[in-house]
Image (tube, grey):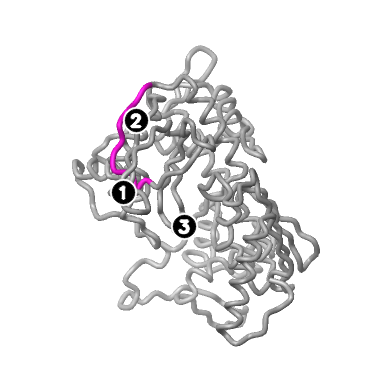
Amino acid sequence: MAYSELIKSFERIRAYMRQFYVYGFKRREEYNQKSARSYDNERRRVESWLGDHMRFRQTAKGKNVFLSVDSRVAGHNPLYKAWKAKSFTDGDITLHFLLFDILYTPEIALTLRELNDEIDKRLSCFDVPCAFDESTLRKKLKEYMQEGLILAEKQGRVTLYRRSECELSAPGGALDYFSEVAPCGVIGSFLLDKTDTAESRFRFKHHYITATLDSEILLQLFGAMREKRAVTITSVTKSGKTAKTAVVPLRIYCSAQSGRQHLMAFVPGYRRRVNSFRVDQITSVEPGEPRADFDALRADLDRMQAHLWGVSTQSPSGARMETVEFTVRYRDDEPFIHQRLEREKRCGAAERLSPNASRFSAEVFDAAEMTPWIRTFIGRITDLRFSDPALQKHFTDDLEEMYRIYGLKGGDGA
């Protein structure tokens, strides 16, 4: 792609806009600060924002491009579009949240090397670790210092960095966002009630508002996790009855697909070490005794994550682990199929077999959780295998029933 509408450095695009469309109206031949290719790329980018307001006239010297804005028609300044095209790289976003998580109070002051070491430590746990050199970190800190978000102070020969004080009376969008998307977001709503704020800046395409009803249960579970203690939960069963279960709460899993929240907890004496409970079916939480093995139990869950597709930790077939493997075929103009596999593979693995075929494989506790996702590839699947014969038959029978409903003849493959 020759150019992108999003920009990293606003100053560069600002200079082009001033030179060509605001003050200078220069032609390509008159601009010698950059190459002709750079000129063309930036011109196309600007035209993508201002196309409705661009005009040109042919002169003896060639084509002359200019802006024409009718204030009777344009209710907003069209040049604002340039500001709204500012982009952020993955590194920008990663550094932003890491820095303000490490310097979470103004009392914490660290040197550049200490900050870099802490960032490396936090990123080292990923399969593909990300690293930032001190030069990049120094530039990011300087940027935040100019914005007034980070303060620097000299102590001898070293410079210490700390975050600046922030007033609750000016929460910006942080509380707006937290109150709508985070577990226990009602806390943010209470804080917003105590501030003089305008209308929320956010609108959500998928907004799971009913989760707020579980906030009190979540607060009690988070409190038990913080204190590393067991609890007794009372939950509603499928039959409508209530049951009490002694558990050690370990983590809360929130589905980005449905908004449903699950408690992942160790159940003493149960056939599996960890089980899941729907938070919206828990009616009460009674605190129990502290658990000395809490950290070890949470580490067990973290290791299990490598084989969790959703929240099910047990196979209906009774097998310790189930395997799934399928192959998809796609056309030359459908590279997004393999990209989907890479993006959505979770604990599985995606392998490109040829320019037009890819294989997905996974070893999970419960392969039945994967079937809704696998169905989205129907029409491209050429081979599909489940280690559980009952699940394989169930999937095939569903396809045959679909063929029957639509009056089609079943194929050899999936």
Highlighted range, magenta = 279-289
- Of all residues shown, which one is farthest toward the right? 354
Mark 2 crowd level (few <14, some 14–19, many ≥20, 10 Å Cα): some
Q: Do the residues labelled 3 and 1 touch (CB within 8 Å)?
A: no
- Looking at the picture, tell me which residue is in the foreground, 114 or 384: 384
Structural distance between the alpha carbons of marks 1 and 2: 27 Å
Three-letter code, disc 2: Gly
Q: Does the magenta stretch include residue 287?
A: yes
Sequence-earlier tag: 3 or 1:
1
**Residue identified by numbered label 2:** 223
Residue 173 seen from this side: no
Residue 279 on image: x %, y %: 37, 45
Question: Is 250 situated above or below 197?
Answer: above
Give the residue drawn at x 34%, y 68%.
Answer: 76
Residue 196 in percent (x, y) is at: 19, 45
Q: Which residue is drawn at 55% across and 22% down?
A: 114
